[in-house]
Image (spheres, rainbow, N blue to C red):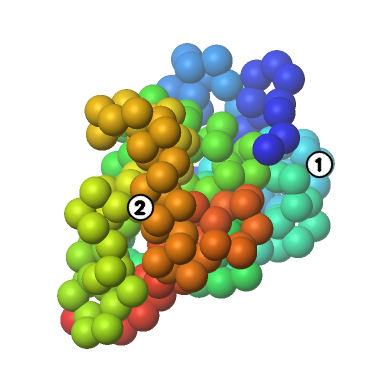
Amino acid sequence: MQEHPGPLKVLIAEDQYLLREGTRRLLEEEGLDVVGVAVDYDTVLSQTRKLHPDVVLMDIRMPPTHTMEGIRAAHEIKTEFPEVGVVVLSQHDDESYVWALLKSGVAGYGYLHKVRVGDVAQLVRALHEVASGGSVLDPRIVERLLALRSRKPGSALGRLTEAEMDVLRLMAEGKNNARVSQELTVSVGTIEKRIAAVFSKLGLSEEAELNRRVAAVLIFLRESATVH
């Protein structure tokens, strides 16, 4: 994971003025450096090239078409600047957006529901995590995907114990071993053993270490996008 000396530099891309300026104020009050703002697909790309932020926080739907400009811009930014983290915000719990965003990898990407802007502490943690090369998925999305996928016949998740499922869910939210240990009130050593069991049962034991915590969820939950 890369470290960022000094305040985290954030570029905000949001076409709604009040939400954009409100988010700017919230982040600046938390000590982050909002280096600039953008209002559409073209300006978020040009501002990223000009300002070199550590992380870009942007809406999925922006002008000109208000469809998936944020996801298209995220992929363009990561192609040009792999070291820049990207957190996209959505008003909808639509897992198809998750797959579209993370189709080529999970490192340095975050996906949050827009309500998370009001939870400043969680938003700031997500920005730092993604800027450092980690991955963050919104807990609400994770909960729903886990529930859908685990009910499918033959699901690999069906082999996990309840305790292992709890660990998997918290891993997917971007929490490290210490945070998972705190939330589940068990030792870090126990968490490490449960994580090893999760990776083994899901066939991820040989995967690269970076971001396999989120990959463990993505690989086995992708089918849930077609479950109703």
Q: Is residue 199 left or right of residue 166?
A: right
Q: Position of residue 113 (x, y in %)?
A: 34, 50
Task: Answer with the quarter of the image where residue 146 lies.
Answer: bottom left
Q: Residue at x 40, y 31 (%)?
A: 188
Using the image, determine if residue 52 lies above or below residue 15: above
Q: Residue at x 29, y 42 (%)?
A: 115
Q: Nearer the viewer, residue 159 or 77?
A: 159
Q: Is residue 204 left or right of residue 55?
A: left
Q: Secondary structure at mark 1?
A: helix
- Residues 115 and 145: in front is 145
Total residue callouts: 2
What's the distance in space between the residues labelled 1 and 2, CA to CA? 38 Å
In the image, what residue occupies the spot 55% across and 37% down?
129
Under circle 2, the secondary element is helix
- Quadrant location of residue 207? bottom right
Note whether 160 is above or below 119 in the view shown: below
Q: Which residue is mark 1?
A: 50
Give the percent coordinates (x, y) of residue 24.
Answer: 50, 28
Looking at the image, is 36 positioned above or below residue 61? above
Where does label 2 land, which residue? 168
